[in-house]
Image (spheres, rainbow, N blue to C red):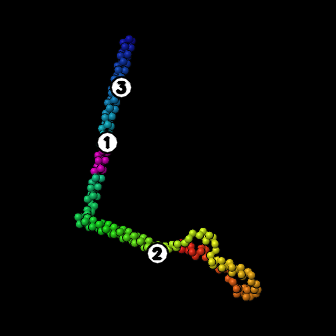
Amino acid sequence: KQQLAAWRAQRDKEKREREEKAAKEEADKRAKDNAKRKQERAVVRAQVKNYHEGKSLEKEVEQLRAEVQMEAAKPRLTVEQLQRIQERNQHLTQERQLAMRRKEQEDMAKQQRVAALLEQSAFTPEVQRDRSRLTTDTMSSGSRKQNHLMDLDKPRQEGYYAIMRPATVSHMPQRATPSWRAGV
């Protein structure tokens, strides 16, 4: 019985050792697999990164090629065309300068004409200073007042002739400023 118990203990011990060994091997295998997967992932990431960098470089190269082709496709001006453009520009600037000179001359002539007209029309009579003349009536307004006063003394006419043919005009136009101040 002891031998049987020792054998069983030995068998259980060997079984545990095998299981531990198998578990250890399995863990080592998993660790190796994980390390291998990590390494493969790193390699794949590096490849993807290189791929993207290559693609971006290809895009840049394509853009540069397209720009070069666009520049090459643009029409180039010949020497004759450039000369013609320069001559046209010079002609246009000369015309503008002439137009500006003409306008200046016209403005000067206009100013001279206006100055001459002002000199001709600037009549300044020599009048004594009489401040009371500003408030006194003009000759015409005085005569109108006198005529009005005489009309009040006359007897009024009644009937048809008073309405249809009045002797006096009731609304005579009057000058607002005296004649001696009219041109000032």
Using the numbered discs, state the Cα–Cα distance from disc 1 to disc 2 in whole angstroms.
Answer: 95 Å
Location of residue 156 (image quadrant): bottom right
In this view, 177 is above or below 1: below
Q: Position of residue 158 (x, y in %)?
A: 76, 86
User: Residues at badges 2 and 3 in contact (C-beta under 8 Å)?
Assistant: no
SS class of the residue under badge 2?
helix
* Structural crowding at the residue carrying mark 1, measured as other residues with C-alpha within 10 Å and reported as few (<14), some (14–19) or many (≥20): few
Residue at 41%, 71% (x, y): give it: 112
Can you tell which of label 2 and label 3 is closer to the viewer? 2
N-terminal of the two: label 2 or label 3? 3
Q: Position of residue 34 (x, y in %)?
A: 34, 32
User: Residues at badges 3 and 1 in contact (C-beta under 8 Å)?
Assistant: no
- Residue 155 got which mark? none
Q: Quadrant of the C terminus?
A: bottom right
Residue that numbered label 3 is attached to: 23
Q: Is residue 163 visible?
A: yes
* Residue that extends furthest to the top in the rendered view of this protein: 2
Residues drawn in magenta: 51-61
- Residue 49 got which mark? 1
Using the numbered discs, state the Cα–Cα distance from disc 2 to disc 3 in whole angstroms.
Answer: 129 Å
Q: Is residue 176 left or right of residue 164?
A: left
Location of residue 129 (image quadrant): bottom right
In this view, 100 is above or below 16: below
Residue at 49%, 73% (x, y): give it: 122
Residue that numbered label 2 is attached to: 120
Amino acid type, callout 1? Lys
